[in-house]
Each structure stands twice: as structure tokens, then as C-alpha cells.
Amino acid sequence: MKIRLISLVFILTTVNFAQAAQPSDESVEKLLSLLGVDKTPALILAHMDAMTANTLREASMGHQASGEEERAIHTFEQKSLAVRSELQERANYQALKPGYIATYREVFSQDEIDQLIVFYQTPTGKMLLAKMPQATQLATAMLQQRLAPVFQRMQQAADDMKQQLDTFRAPKPAPKQ
């Protein structure tokens, strides 16, 4: 009886450890590939390029820029190129991959990774992968639109406080004698 109990505890413990086994780097890499994580850096750069182009378009909209304005725009362009270069270096997939692998290995077991790989290879998994970016984009736009007034009020409150602090901190004229 005692041996049976010890055997049962051993089997249950072994099964539990087997289910919670840490995933291999290879299996996580396969999942990351299916998820298209390697495309993320290019998406980040494209988003930054779009933001830069939009900022430049807004800056030049409506009138001919003066010499000082042209210099300010040129300075912005140079700074954006430097930031883009740094972003390109830091967001390189090969540089990020060890962090992704460590994150997935911490969060998922080998069994879970295996199940996800199987799922994302099915027609439903492929459909989800194909449509998720659009769903995420639409949901993000909806959230931004819904929350914009709140953030605008917060920005206005911050601007008001800054203006008040600037007024309080401004040098006071000396009293006339």
C-alpha cells in the first residue's frame, strides 16, 4: 500500500512537471515565426516614417516657410533621421529575438507552445493571424477617438498649470519708490 501511494505521488508529480516543462528555444522560434513577430520592427519603422511625414506636412501647410522656419524644419528632419537610425538599430529582430524567446519561455509551457503552433497552422489560426492586425488597428482607433476628449482635458489642465507656474515664477517688477 505504501509503495502504491509513493508511486502514485511520483507519477502525479512527474506528469505535473512534464506538463509545465519549459519550452525549447526552437519551439518558441517556430511560434514567433508563425506569429510574424519578425515583421514588427518594419511596422514600427513604417509608423515612425508616417508620423514624421505627417509632422512635416502639417508644418508646411498653408504658407511659405521663412528662413528660420526652414532651418527649424531641417533640424527636425535631421533629428528624425537620427532617431530613426537608432530605432532601426534597437528594434532589429535579431537583437530582440532573445528577449522574445525569454518572455515566451517564462509565460508558456512547452505544451502550450505546441498547442499554439498547431492552432496557428490551422485555417482558423491563419485567418486570425491575417485579421488580427486590422482588428487591433480598428480597436485602437476606436479607443483613441473615445478617449481623446479625456486626454485633451488632461493636456489642457497640464497647460493651465504650466502657465500658472510660469506666471508665479516670473520675476516680479521691483516696487517703485
Image (cartoon, rainbow, N blue to C red):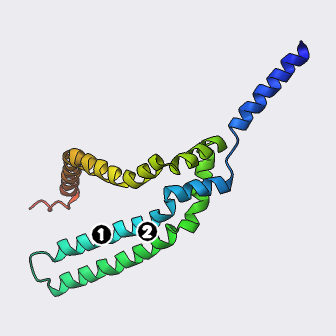
Q: Residue beneath label 1, please?
A: 50
Which amino acid, by three-letter code, is at mark 1? Answer: Ala
Expressed as whole percent of the image width and height from the top left, the position of residue 140 reads 30, 50
Q: Secondary structure at mark 1?
A: helix
In the rendered structure, the answer to whether residue 170 lies left or right of residue 81 reads: left
Residue at screen point 66% across, 57% down: 26
In the displayed orientation, state which residue is furthest to the top. Answer: 1
In the rendered structure, the answer to whether residue 83 lies left or right of residue 12 reads: left
Q: CA distance from mark 2 to mark 1?
A: 12 Å
Which amino acid, by three-letter code, is at mark 2? Answer: Ala
Crowding at dot 2, Cα within 10 Å, few <14 / some 14-19 / many 20+, comes out as some
Q: Secondary structure at mark 2?
A: helix
Q: Is residue 177 visible?
A: no
Q: Residue beneath label 2, please?
A: 42
Residue at screen point 26% across, 51% down: 141
Q: Is residue 128 visible?
A: yes
Q: Quadrant of residue 172?
A: bottom left
Expressed as whole percent of the image width and height from the top left, the position of residue 113 reads 60, 46
In the displayed orientation, state which residue is furthest to the bottom. Answer: 67
In the rendered structure, the answer to whether residue 12 lies left or right of residue 136 reads: right
